[in-house]
Amino acid sequence: MAALTPDEMYSMSGEAVASIQLAALRMRFGDLVGRISVLGRLAEEQRIDAIESIEDAAALLFPHSFYKSYPLTLIDNSRFDRLTRWLGGLTSVDLSTFDASGCKTIDDWIQALDAETDVRVVHSSGTSGKLSFLPRGTPEIDAMAAAWPRGYTGFGNEPNNPLPGIENVPVLLPNFRRGGLGPVRMIDGIVRRIYGGRENMIVALHPGRMSADMLSLGGRIRAAEAKGERGALELPLQLLARRDAFLKEQSEAPARRSAFFARVAAEFRGRRVVLLGNWAQHHDIASEALKKGIAKVFSPDSLLMIVGGLKGRKLPDDYRDVIKSYLGIQNLRAGYGMSECVALHPACPQGNYHLQPFIIPFVLDPQTGAPLPRTGMQRGRYGFVDLLAQTHWGGFLSGDAVTLCWGDTRPCACGRSGPYVHSEIRRYAEIEGGDDKVTCAGAPEAHDKALSFLHELG
């Protein structure tokens, strides 16, 4: 299904998609249940030894807490041997022979895994004070890259259908070139799969590596400040040693971003480019540039993809127009995605996020965890099974509150068939005042036991 064009994907009947999804779900579960120990434990607790229907998978969604269920003391005490054992419970890749004895920091650990195993750790930004670690493999990184052009490709009579020549368009990346964040991992796959190894097609704000240790440090400081406990915060020596570098990095970031966009505006003016980033980031740069009389910088057929919402910022009502005026691009594309999902779901001209057919979506009642009907329009917690995941289980229960239309009673006006998510997406942690009370489908104690087992592995 990954080779389908957007026109083909979004023109399939619901019955055809469901039939293919069920066959693929059975294959994925059958292949991974005996190779991923936590999935095996959860399936055993839920008394599921085979998938009979799509609904069966609702009881096998890993809550987002699974990927940060390790004891934080493992990092504080540099016990990356035990952290590796914990990670091994989430992947089909055998990590039993990996030697983590030389790892003193998170960065050491991730880079050693990159060099010596087939696991490519994707980590979160650590805003809660604790990083999530997702064990991806090279198949998932390549699948991310293969899916990337579809985010810009139109449907029917929309612009960029078909999408011309993206393999010759440079990417302007307002981020680090290296590291374990999902978008950066995707760039690794894009260079290999789309650009044939041409690293010069990526123009990054930072040519170096985004430090996971820096993110961990920043997250812990922010979490302690939010609780009024910064004075009581105790950090391990390996993080304290990097505190000054983190503070310097933080203070220089605004000036560095401005310099980066000034440089690319000069070097790439009038050219077709691909731009990545988030709304707040692009709005800040655009506002500053327009004040200096810098406008319509790139070719109008350039490509922009925004992921991640407003990042907690309150922007002016005309923020999109400000960005358009600076960039000179009229076709701004937004996408809905997360580190736990290989594919990105692009927004259509109506502003809805259309789910690609290799994603099996679920909407769960936020109070009971029961899956809501797979018809009409449903509001609740978003979960899914990502059928592109090959080395880890693609079942995931997010922290997002969504409104999902199944497309059967209210098709989107853009003409695409199938389910879509409305643009207003909120976090349950925000709705519930900072406490995301995850209730899983099936028996909650089964998920608790699987989580306890994963914790014991660490």
Image: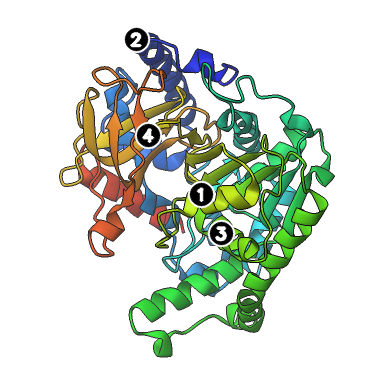
The residue wearing badge 4 is 384
Of callouts 4 and 3, which one flags the residue occurring earlier in the amino acid sequence? 3
The residue wearing badge 1 is 321
374 to the left or right of 309 = left
The residue wearing badge 2 is 15
Expressed as whole percent of the image width and height from the top left, the position of residue 96 reads 60, 48
* Residue at (62% x, 71% y) in the render: 254
100 to the left or right of 431 = right
SS class, disc 1: helix
Could you classify mark 3 by the number of other residues whose Cα lies within 10 Å: few (under 14), some (14-19), or many (20 or more)? some
Q: Amino acid at mark 1?
A: Asp
Q: CA distance from mark 1 to mark 4?
A: 34 Å
SS class, disc 4: strand
Please state which of residues 116 and 203 is positioned toward the viewer in this rendering.
Answer: 203
231 to the left or right of 446 = right
Q: CA distance from mark 1 to mark 3?
A: 14 Å
* Residue at (36% x, 45% y) in the render: 398
User: Residue 294, relative to residue 149: is it above or below?
Assistant: below
Labelled disc at residue 77: none
Expressed as whole percent of the image width and height from the top left, the position of residue 420 reads 36, 29
Could you classify mark 1 by the number of other residues whose Cα lies within 10 Å: few (under 14), some (14-19), or many (20 or more)? some
Of callouts 1 and 4, which one flags the residue occurring earlier in the amino acid sequence? 1
- The label nearer to you, 3 versus 2, is 3
Q: Is residue 208 visible?
A: no
Q: CA distance from mark 1 to mark 2?
A: 40 Å
User: Residue 455, relative to residue 413: is it above or below?
Assistant: below
Of callouts 4 and 2, which one flags the residue occurring earlier in the amino acid sequence? 2
Labelled disc at residue 281: 3
